[in-house]
């Protein structure tokens, strides 16, 4: 055990779900509420074990609705908090995810995606919740969603998710998948002092002067916790800067656009992707999560056959890298978008390409990853 | 009140008849009258949304008095509500207060309490919110003995949405969605939470303001899951739909038909339509809380290491 029990500095052999849990602990998460669900259960199991070691709280709630509600409450109690689930549980969490968006509550929600709809494929892979991540709860709000493609990234991106949630004050989504979650690989955990953490943006103002929903220059309001004598009011109703309900069109029209704008205006700082071979590319494969690893193989095979193809891996699915895809579309012939669903992120690529480049979707209803050959065939088709 | 206004040179009648064009009189406006509980209420949110003769305001008054009488520092309190008429309570109490989603006040409160056990977390919500859509959370919080207080204002009906049938609506009562009389059996709420493990369970009505307050004091002082049900009049919907008269008539009904029975077997306290209502303190026992047990297990584990 290292000196800092929350950060297991060293080299490990662990699966993606366990790495998510370790990333959360390294980020300072001390509250986890969850409900067992395949293939995300290992996150909860690890947390149940490790929270005892770090003096944090693990609670198994009665369902995913309660899990999401509890992590919001814990955030307002001053903790960094997280829950983890998969498809059916993700659907149940949409209600309180919306409350988190409306009340600008920092926390992290991990979805280890499996095949759907409904109970679908509990033990098998899917990437079918990508649009639910963007639009799942009712009403308008901005979203940050990260897509790890390895256990190492499960660790790293969970830390990033906590930092982003604190910076922009919203629940941040980690959109893992069954294969990444259950894959065991080397994970390097750095020394605690090398891990950059964003603390809660606590107001410098005293009670009386502080207005809980008055945004700063970056469009994000500062926060306080319950018990600090600020006598704060927080509601899921449309509210004014004091946090008081104000169910009127004018307040709605200045409050809700900010929930999107705080992400949109800061998108260049938030958006992350990994690109390779774009310099001479005629075709670009846009991919994420486990599919990016199969796509890498297909791209290498295509390159071997002389096709000028590059790879563009989304690390943030949301916000989507609109500018980068838009610019690429002006100089490539086509995009190939493999994903384990029947067409989700491909719509974003099409939107950003705006007809300037052809977009080919390589769908997969779920249950297994793609065969590299199917992606290769699409690459060759797009290059023609 | 009248005397004060006249002294300040603003006769009541003149103010009412002057109309919008009348300029302010030369005398300074009288200081806004201070309510003795202003310190704990958000006066800047008035007027509130509740109907005349609604029982929720009475519950809030008793609760505010209970906070003062509890001996617990005000800033330690956090109020969590769900959705509905009673769900609006959080918004009127000048303490850290959270107005959450429908039925989900208890999970939110669970997270808030466990994140900072120094807080005194009180869930203040209605019967529809806590017992229907939030019923699962209610029984599990009681089972875990989470150290929070739940105040359930039970007016037998969904008020905010206009008078629909609830799982607490007495058998036979009319609502907009049981126009021919409710054909379902209602929950016996004290029995439900007591059988799930609540360590403090009391029921009073909006008529019993002092005993309600005392129950609230005992509930917030109690370690563990404490529950106070308050039967409250909804004259606008429940009384009107059932031709029971005004809020006054409902209070008179409570006066004539409540039976104080401390320590009653909760299986006997179910409520029939316009039948006697058993009130009192039903359960008051000691039991380790969720956190007590969690810490106990961790200490045991640490000793083994």
Image (spheres, helix red, strand yellow):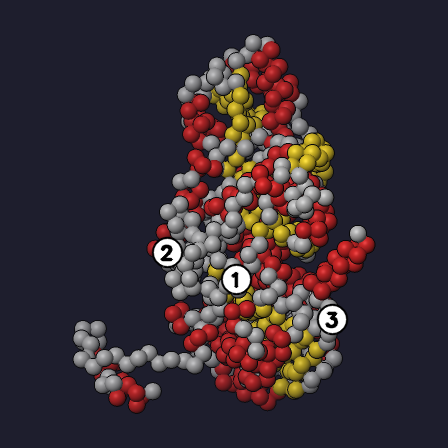
Classify the position of the N terminus of chain A by image quarter: top right
Q: Chain of mark 1?
A: A
Where, by quadrant of the figure, is residue B181 drawn?
A: bottom right
What chain letter is assigned to the residue under label 2? Answer: A
Determine which residue is flagged by label 3: B287
Judging from the image, mark 3 belongs to the subunit labelled B
Q: Residues within 10 Å of mark 3 (few under 14, many from 20)?
A: some
Distance from disc 1 to disc 2, alpha carbons, whole Å, reads 25 Å
Same subunit, labels 3 and 2: the answer reads no
Q: Which residue is mark 1?
A: A226
Mark 2, residue position: A251
Q: Look at 69% across and 85% down and name the residue there.
A: B261
Callout 3: SS: loop
Taking the image as shown, residue B291 lies to the left or right of residue A261, namely right
Same chain for labels 3 and 1? Say yes or no.
Answer: no
Q: In the rendering, at what x and y percent does residue B130 appear?
A: 60, 66
Q: Secondary structure at mark 1?
A: loop
Q: Is residue B214 above or below residue A14?
A: below
Q: Is residue A121 above or below residue B2?
A: above
Q: Residue at x 40, y 69 (%)?
A: B45
Q: Residue at x 72, y 61 (%)?
A: B295
- Mark 2 crowd level (few <14, some 14–19, many ≥20, 10 Å Cα): some
Q: Picture coordinates of residue A238 (x, y %)?
A: 43, 57
Closer to us: B225 or B171: B225
Label 1 close to label 2 by CB (< 8 Å): no
Distance between mark 3 and mark 1 Cα atoms:
27 Å
Residue at x 51%, y 51% (from the top left corner): A200
Front residue of this view, candidates A114 and A206: A206
Secondary structure at badge 2 equals helix
């Amino acid at each position: 055990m290292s000196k800092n029990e929350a950060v297991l500095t060293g080299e490990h052999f662990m699966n993606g779900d366990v790495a998510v849990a370790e990333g959360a602990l390294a980020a300072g998460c001390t509250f986890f509420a969850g409900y067992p669900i395949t293939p995300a259960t290992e996150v909860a199991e690890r947390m149940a074990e490790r929270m005892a070691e770090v003096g944090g709280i693990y609670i198994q709630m009665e369902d995913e609705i309660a899990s999401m509600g509890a992590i919001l409450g814990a955030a307002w109690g001053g903790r960094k908090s997280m829950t983890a689930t998969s498809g059916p549980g993700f659907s149940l969490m949409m209600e309180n995810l919306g409350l988190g968006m409306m009340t600008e509550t920092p926390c992290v929600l991990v979805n280890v995606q499996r095949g759907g709809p409904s109970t679908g494929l509990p033990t098998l892979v899917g990437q079918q919740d990508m649009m639910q991540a963007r639009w799942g709860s009712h009403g308008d709000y901005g979203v940050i969603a990260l897509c790890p493609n390895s256990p190492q990234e499960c660790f790293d991106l969970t830390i990033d998710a906590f930092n982003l949630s604190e910076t922009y004050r919203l629940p941040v989504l980690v959109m893992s998948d069954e294969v990444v979650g259950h894959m065991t690989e080397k994970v390097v955990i750095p020394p605690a002092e090398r891990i950059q953490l964003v603390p809660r943006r606590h107001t410098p103002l005293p009670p009386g002067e502080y207005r809980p929903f008055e945004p700063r220059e970056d469009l994000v309001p500062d926060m306080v916790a319950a018990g600090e004598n600020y006598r704060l009011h927080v509601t899921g109703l449309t509210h004014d800067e004091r946090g008081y309900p104000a169910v009127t069109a004018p307040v709605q029209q200045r409050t809700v656009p900010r929930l999107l704008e705080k992400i949109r205006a800061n998108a260049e700082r938030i958006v992350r992707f990994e690109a390779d071979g774009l310099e001479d590319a005629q075709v670009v494969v846009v991919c994420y999560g486990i599919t990016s690893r199969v796509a890498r193989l297909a791209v290498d095979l295509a390159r071997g056959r002389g096709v000028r193809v590059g790879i563009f891996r989304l690390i943030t699915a949301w916000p989507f890298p609109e500018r980068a895809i838009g610019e690429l579309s002006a100089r490539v012939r086509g995009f190939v978008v493999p994903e384990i669903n029947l067409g989700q992120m491909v719509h974003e690529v099409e939107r950003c390409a705006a007809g300037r480049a052809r977009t080919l979707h390589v769908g997969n209803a779920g249950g297994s990853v793609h065969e590299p050959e199917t992606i290769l065939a699409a690459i060759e088709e797009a290059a023609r | 009140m009248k005397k004060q206004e006249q002294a300040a040179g603003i006769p009541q009648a003149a103010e009412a008849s002057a109309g919008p064009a009348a300029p302010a009189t030369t005398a300074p406006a009288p200081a806004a009258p201070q309510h003795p509980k202003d310190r704990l209420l958000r006066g800047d949110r008035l007027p509130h949304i509740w109907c005349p003769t609604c029982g929720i305001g009475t519950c809030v008054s008793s609760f505010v008095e209970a906070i003062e009488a509890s001996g617990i520092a005000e800033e330690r309190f956090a109020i969590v509500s769900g959705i509905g008429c009673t769900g609006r309570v959080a918004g009127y109490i000048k303490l850290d207060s959270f107005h959450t989603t429908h039925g989900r006040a208890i999970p939110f409160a669970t997270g808030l309490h466990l994140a900072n056990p120094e807080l005194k977390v009180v869930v203040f919500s209605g019967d529809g919110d806590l017992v229907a859509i939030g019923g699962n959370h209610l029984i599990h919080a009681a089972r875990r003995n989470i150290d929070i207080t739940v105040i359930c204002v039970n007016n037998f009906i969904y008020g905010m949405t206009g008078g629909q049938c609830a799982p607490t609506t007495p058998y036979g009562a009319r609502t907009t969605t049981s126009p021919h009389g409710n054909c379902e059996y209602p929950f016996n709420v004290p029995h439900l939470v007591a059988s799930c493990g609540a360590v403090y369970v009391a029921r009073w009505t909006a008529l019993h303001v002092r005993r309600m307050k005392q129950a609230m004091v005992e509930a917030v002082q109690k370690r563990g899951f404490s529950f106070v049900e308050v039967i409250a009049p909804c004259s606008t919907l429940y009384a009107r739909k059932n031709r029971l008269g005004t809020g006054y008539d409902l209070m008179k009904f409570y006066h004539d038909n409540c039976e104080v029975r401390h320590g009653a077997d909760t299986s006997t306290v179910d409520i029939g339509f316009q039948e006697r209502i058993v009130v009192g303190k039903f359960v008051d026992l000691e039991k380790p809380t969720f956190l007590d047990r969690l810490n106990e297990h961790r200490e045991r584990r640490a000793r083994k290491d």
